[in-house]
Image (cartoon, rainbow, N blue to C red):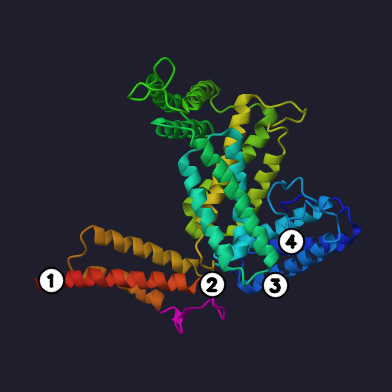
């Protein structure tokens, strides 16, 4: 189980039956997540979702009687994400686990555009934004993608307002706006850079991350030295220790960029002699984080064929526990000693990199049930092949398209009354798969017509 096995009883005895009910639901969700003998269907997920909503209503009825100051930790009613998982009450921690799993199940069954699917993604976005705020090391590109995702989630939740509980819609809307406020704050901090400094700043962020990446893999010293040389090239552009514009002015934000440059130089100097060696007191935590990062990295490369979105739950919970084990932002060993700078930065890089992979995997999730993914993935591959053929000048003869046509027809023939069936079920995502099938047929037709025209000439 990804959550803490032993949980203290709730402070209010009336919440104990709710806690017991939520734990049973969470256990059922966990078992469903682990079952690979069959595809997950809407009929598996929706009854569990309805049972969680019933428990939420019971919980809200109890907490509605309490004074406001005693009612700050409830996930279903909280207006923001200011509490962490470890600070939440016992009931709220289990409830959050249920919502996280349900959210990932909605992605698994292809209902990505419905409100519950936004819950897990907002949790990951908040983690990423908290880390970016903590270290003040990020680029405009980081914020652009998250801003786009928040806009999509905002529209998704609004469009689902008639289909789901108003309390859930309010909760998700508040989570999105808290994330948006954090993004706006980070954007304002970047706006302090003027002139050519934004480009230099972005380059330095990229180099810093490259050095950190090399540090957590087996690397040759020459690899880091090349990165260090690029940092020194930027350093050489300074005049008397400052970046100066073409007109001789010192642009606003110069001090911050120079400070980042010094961090990059210092970090590369630290990484080179250490060669990725972590002290024994922190080696077990390091190995766990490296393993998580490597598994998520592999999933990001093979996502279309191997990912069940609910798999991300265990990774996220492991990361949350390690992240929240820090004291005043620092990692500590079994004796309570703080980690040195090298260990601190290495572990934090691995955590942030892993959260980044989880975010990427969530936003890349296709609105197609896992039952239809084999067909969808084959069609995507076919589409890429046909586009490549088209961009390469097409074919000289319609006969060359025969393999593509055969594959398309074989997939099309799988439909029953126009729908792709799995047993007696009609999986979610029919529209996406059929649209992709039509695009492939259109591309194939265009190539055939062009080839026939050339043959006639």
Residue 213 coordinates in the image, percent (x, y) = 50, 35
Residues at circles 2 and 1 in contact by the CB criterion of under 8 Å: no
In reply to whether residue 415 is colored magenta, the answer given is yes
Residue 63's mark?
A: none
Please indicate whether residue 61 sits to the left or right of residue 250 in the image. Answer: right
Q: Residues within 10 Å of mark 1 (few under 14, many from 20)?
A: few
Q: Which residue is mark 2?
A: 428
**Dividing the picture into quarters, in which one does residue 311 lie?**
bottom right
In reply to whether residue 275 is colored magenta, the answer given is no
Q: Which residue is mark 3?
A: 47
Identify the residue at image location x=47%, y=33%: 205
Viewer-closest of 330 and 385 = 330
Q: CA distance from mark 3 to mark 1?
A: 59 Å
Residue 455's mark?
A: 1
Identify the mark nearer the N-term, 4 or 3.
4
Q: Residues within 10 Å of mark 3 (few under 14, many from 20)?
A: few
Q: CA distance from mark 4 to mark 3?
A: 13 Å
Identify the residue at image location x=62%, y=28%: 343
Please indicate whether residue 11 sits to the left or right of residue 230 in the image. Answer: right
Q: CA distance from mark 2 to mark 4?
A: 23 Å
């Amino acid at each position: 189980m990804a959550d803490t096995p032993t949980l203290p009883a709730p402070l209010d005895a009336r919440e104990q039956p709710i806690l017991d009910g939520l734990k049973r639901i969470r256990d059922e969700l966990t078992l469903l997540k682990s079952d690979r003998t069959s595809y997950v269907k809407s009929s598996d997920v929706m009854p569990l979702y309805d049972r969680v909503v019933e428990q939420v209503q019971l919980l809200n009825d109890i907490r509605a009687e309490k004074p406001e100051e005693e009612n700050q930790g409830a996930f279903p009613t909280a207006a923001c994400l200011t509490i962490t998982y470890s600070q939440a009450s016992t009931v709220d921690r289990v409830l959050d686990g249920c919502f996280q799993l349900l959210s990932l199940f909605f992605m698994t069954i292809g209902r990505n555009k419905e409100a519950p699917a936004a819950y897990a993604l907002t949790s990951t976005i908040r983690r990423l934004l908290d880390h970016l705020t903590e270290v003040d090391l990020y680029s405009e590109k980081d914020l652009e993608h998250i801003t786009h995702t928040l806009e999509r989630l905002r529209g998704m939740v609004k469009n689902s307002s008639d289909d789901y509980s108003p309390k859930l819609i309010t909760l998700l809307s508040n989570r999105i706006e808290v994330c948006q406020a954090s993004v706006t704050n980070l954007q304002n901090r970047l706006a302090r850079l003027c002139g050519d400094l934004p480009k230099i700043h972005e380059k330095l962020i990229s180099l810093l991350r490259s050095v950190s990446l090399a540090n957590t893999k087996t690397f040759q010293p020459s690899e880091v030295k090349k990165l260090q040389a690029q940092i020194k090239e930027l350093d050489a552009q300074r005049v008397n220790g400052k970046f100066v514009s073409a007109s001789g002015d010192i642009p606003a934000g110069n001090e911050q960029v120079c400070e980042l440059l010094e961090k990059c130089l210092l970090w590369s100097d630290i990484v080179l002699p250490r060669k990725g060696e972590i002290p024994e007191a922190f080696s077990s935590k390091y190995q766990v984080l490296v393993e998580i990062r490597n598994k998520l990295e592999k999933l990001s490369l093979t996502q279309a064929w191997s990912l069940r979105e609910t798999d991300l739950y265990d990774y996220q919970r492991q990361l949350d526990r390690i992240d929240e084990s820090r004291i005043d932002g620092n990692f500590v060993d079994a004796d309570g000693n703080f980690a040195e700078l090298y260990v601190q930065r290495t572990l934090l890089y691995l955590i942030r990199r892993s959260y980044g992979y989880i975010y990427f995997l969530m936003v890349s999730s296709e609105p197609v049930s896992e039952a239809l993914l084999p067909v969808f993935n084959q069609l995507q591959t076919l589409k890429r092949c046909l586009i490549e053929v088209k961009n390469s000048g097409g074919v000289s003869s319609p006969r060359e398209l025969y393999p593509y046509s055969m594959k398309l027809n074989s997939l099309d023939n799988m439909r029953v009354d126009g729908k792709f069936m799995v047993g007696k079920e009609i999986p979610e995502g029919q529209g996406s798969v059929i649209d992709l099938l039509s695009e492939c047929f259109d591309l194939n037709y265009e190539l055939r017509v062009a080839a026939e025209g050339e043959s006639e000439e």
